[in-house]
Image (cartoon, rainbow, N blue to C red):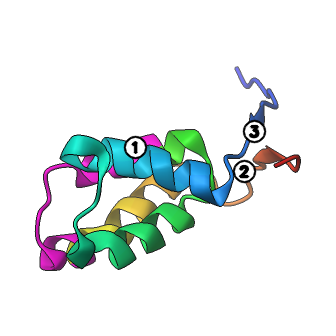
């Protein structure tokens, strides 16, 4: 049985996405300076999608070195987005 359902997802602004990512990924809700650039790049790759931010930031929580972040960063983002079929259509609300 195959079901098709479209769900419109409201994307967070870049700042809102970063705030959510930072709150989830880092104890105290603030990223250390040495991880900020890498973390910001990862947050941006989540494209403002709250579910992606929650999954990826949660997976990064507790990682404290730049080496850990660099080695896991692309792996986590790719793993999340690869769960959707290649032609999967994600509808994004363009109102930001």
* Dot in front, 1 or 3: 3
Give the magenta-colored segment's residue range: 54-70
Residue 68 lies in magenta, yes or no? Answer: yes
Label located before the other in sequence (2 or 1): 1
* Dot in front, 3 or 2: 3
From this view, report whether residue 33 is shown above or below residue 1: below
Q: Secondary structure at mark 1?
A: helix
Q: How far from the left and from the top, in percent, is residue 58?
A: 30, 44
| Callout 3 crowding tier (Cα within 10 Å): few <14, some 14–19, many ≥20 | some
Q: How far from the left and from the top, in percent, is residue 62?
A: 13, 51
Is 73 left or right of 41, judged from the image as shown?
A: left
Residue at position x 45%, y 53% from top? Answer: 80
* Dot in front, 2 or 1: 1
The disc placed on residue 88 is: 2
Residue at position x 54%, y 58% from top? Answer: 46
From this view, report whether residue 15 is shown above or below residue 32: above
Q: Are marks 2 and 1 in contact (CB under 8 Å)?
A: no
Q: How far from the left and from the top, in percent, is residue 95?
A: 88, 46
The disc placed on residue 20 is: none
Residue at position x 25%, y 55% from top? Answer: 60
Q: Nearer the viewer, residue 66 or 71?
A: 66
Is 67 left or right of 35, judged from the image as shown?
A: left
Q: CA distance from mark 3 to mark 2?
A: 17 Å
The disc placed on residue 55 is: 1
Q: Nearer the viewer, residue 40 or 83?
A: 40
Label located before the other in sequence (1 or 3): 3
Q: CA distance from mark 1 to mark 3?
A: 17 Å
Residue that label 3 marks: 10
Is 62 left or right of 12, judged from the image as shown?
A: left
């Amino acid at each position: 049985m195959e079901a098709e359902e479209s769900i419109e997802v409201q994307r967070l602004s870049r700042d809102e996405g970063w705030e959510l990512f930072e709150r989830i990924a880092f104890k105290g809700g603030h990223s250390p300076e040495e991880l900020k650039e890498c973390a910001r790049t990862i947050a941006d790759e989540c494209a403002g999608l709250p579910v992606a931010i929650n999954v990826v930031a949660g997976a990064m929580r507790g990682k404290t070195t730049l080496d850990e972040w660099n080695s896991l960063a692309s792996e986590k983002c790719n793993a999340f987005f690869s769960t959707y079929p290649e032609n999967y259509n994600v509808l994004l609300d363009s109102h930001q």
